[in-house]
Each structure stands twice: as structure tokens, then as C-alpha cells.
Image (cartoon, grey):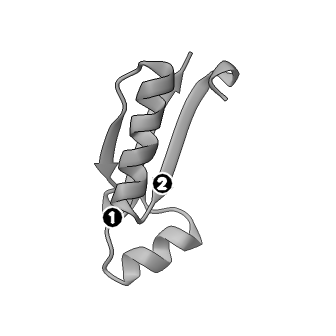
């Protein structure tokens, strides 16, 4: 996966899943990877809209692959 390069982005409604994904990326790739809450205007998929309308926060892990 890392050899593909480019931008990798994970978006989900479980903060612990996002944190674990970011930790795994740091372990295998060594890059700094942050977990951020998605802003209201950043919601784009039907999945994200469903969880946002339920009042749940959404999280994003985003990193540049080598």
C-alpha cells in the first residue's frame, strides 16, 4: 500500500479506529499522521451525512505516502 504513493485518507465515525489506523501508518511508514475531526462542510458521502445528521462526530486520517 505504501508503495502506491500519493495521498491516503481514511474517514470514519469511530475515533479509536482512526487512532489505531494512524498508529499503524506511523509504525510502518514513519510519517507523522494526525487524526482530525471532520468539519460540518467536509461531509461528502451518504455514510458521512447519515452519521453527521445523527449528531455523531466524524474523524479523518490523512497522510502523504512515499
For this orientation, the residue located farthest to the bottom is: 54
Query: What percent of the width, then of the height, locates residue 52?
Result: 38, 74
Q: Is residue 39 above or below residue 5?
A: below
What residue is at 51 percent from the left and 24 percent from the top?
28
Foreground tag (1 vs 2) = 2
Q: Which quadrant, please, contains the N terminus?
A: top right
Left or right of 44 in this view: 20: left
* Label ID, residue 8: none
Could you say which quadrant of the image residue 58 lies in? bottom left
In contact (CB < 8 Å): disc 1 and disc 2: no
Q: Which residue is mark 1?
A: 40
In-front residue for pair 26/11:
26
Query: What percent of the width, then of the height, locates residue 11?
Result: 48, 54
Q: Which residue is mark 2?
A: 11
What residue is at 30 percent from the left and 47 percent from the top?
36
**Sequence-first disc among 1 and 2:** 2
What residue is at 34 percent from the left and 24 percent from the top?
32
User: Dot 1: within a 10 Å radius of its alpha carbon, few (fewer than 14), some, or many (20 or more) residues?
Assistant: few
Q: Secondary structure at mark 2?
A: strand
Q: Is residue 64 above or below residue 54?
A: above
User: Dot 2: within a 10 Å radius of its alpha carbon, few (fewer than 14), some, or many (20 or more) residues?
Assistant: many
Q: Which quadrant, please, contains the C terminus?
A: top right
Query: What percent of the width, then of the height, locates residue 29?
Result: 49, 21
Amino acid at each position: 500500500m505504501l508503495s502506491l504513493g500519493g495521498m491516503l485518507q481514511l474517514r470514519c465515525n469511530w475515533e479509536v479506529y482512526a487512532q489505531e489506523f494512524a498508529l499503524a501508518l506511523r509504525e510502518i511508514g514513519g510519517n507523522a499522521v494526525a487524526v482530525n475531526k471532520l468539519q460540518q462542510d467536509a461531509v461528502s458521502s451518504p455514510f458521512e451525512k447519515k452519521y453527521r445528521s445523527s449528531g455523531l462526530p466524524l474523524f479523518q486520517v490523512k497522510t502523504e505516502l512515499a
